[in-house]
Amino acid sequence: MFVVTGVTGKVGGKLARTLLASGQSVRAVVRSASKGDVWQTRGCDIAIVPDGTDATALAKAFKGASGVFLMQPPDYDPEPGFPNVQRLSAAVSAAIAQARPDKVVYLSTVGAQVEQFNLLNNARIVERMLAESGIPVAFLRAAWFMENAAWDVAAARAGRIESYLQPPDRAIDMVSTRDIGRVAADLLCEQWSGVRVVELSGPRKVSPLDIASGFATALGHAVDVAAVPRATWEQRFRSEGMQHPQARMRMLDGFNEGWIDFERNGTEQRTGSVALEAVLAELANEQ
């Protein structure tokens, strides 16, 4: 039995469907019974955990698992010191210590190893906790999600997208959530001891100009791209409701300046197959 958290999202959903298609038993962890209905229909066992800091409920969900896929809900506006992820990590640590699943695959991120303050320190905190669990664990450090371009569909329809990744011709590693789910399924079915770090990129690096071009093809009209001036970021983020924008700003700085990247030395490298153009076409058709 493989336990999948985040099953209602793109990565967890792809992972669960991949495991089910290969004949594996899956326990889907959801926040409410209604969210689990569709997965129960597909053949999953359902574990309801309304509160991610409930270690007892998590331990019950993890009990008897051949492997657990762990991902935590994104927190784009963390308070100083990342208290939310600290609480979630403490609960997961206690649950793992009690349930003792055979292995854990954690959806981490490119740059999780970076010590400089930035939003991705969230993943660094979880990695450290899991490394001390005493069970086999794999950190799946995925590149920037191609599907993040969903935020730009409306702007692309109007003919111009804005980018915090800059300059617009600078390409970074990106990967589709479909590839992430598939590789996570592969890892859950593998055997190892100790800690693994698996870095996952897409078929090629991607720039904001590439995204604009891909949208232009999908939508059938020209799409321009403009870099959002760095001096305006904080005001813009605060106007959108963020209270602690510095972590997000420093993450973007890290990608733009190059100090957020894959570790590479001492890690495993895997490459996805889903092309950016396919992802953008799907996003354009969905919205």
Image (cartoon, grey):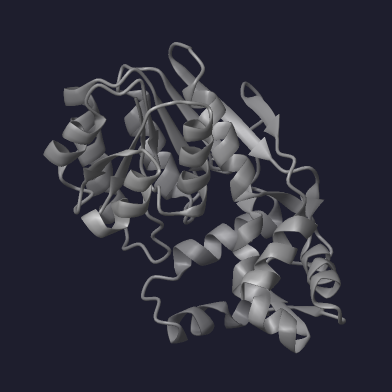
Rendered residue at 35%/29% (across/down): 130
Residue 209 placement: quadrant: bottom right
Q: Is residue 285 above or below residue 136?
A: below
| Of 10 and 252, the residue lying toward us | 10
Q: Quadrant of the C terminus?
A: bottom right
Count of numbered labels shown in the rendering: 0
Residue 75 position in % (x across, y down): 38, 60
From the viewer's perspective, is 133 left or right of 235? left
From the viewer's perspective, is 93 left or right of 105? left
Residue farthest along the left direction in this orientation: 56
From the viewer's perspective, is 154 left or right of 222? left
Residue farthest along the front direction in this orientation: 41
| Of 50 and 271, the residue lying toward us | 50
Q: Is residue 107 above or below residue 94?
A: below
Residue 68 position in % (x across, y down): 36, 30
Q: Quadrant of the N terminus?
A: top left
Residue 55 placement: quadrant: top left
Residue 101 position in % (x across, y down): 29, 21
Rendered residue at 20%/48% (across/down): 49
Residue 210 position in % (x across, y down): 82, 63
Rendered residue at 76%/57% (across/down): 278
Rendered residue at 52%/31% (across/down): 185
- Whether residue 211 appears in this view of the structure is yes
- Whether residue 82 appears in this view of the structure is no
Q: Is residue 135 above or below residue 45?
A: above
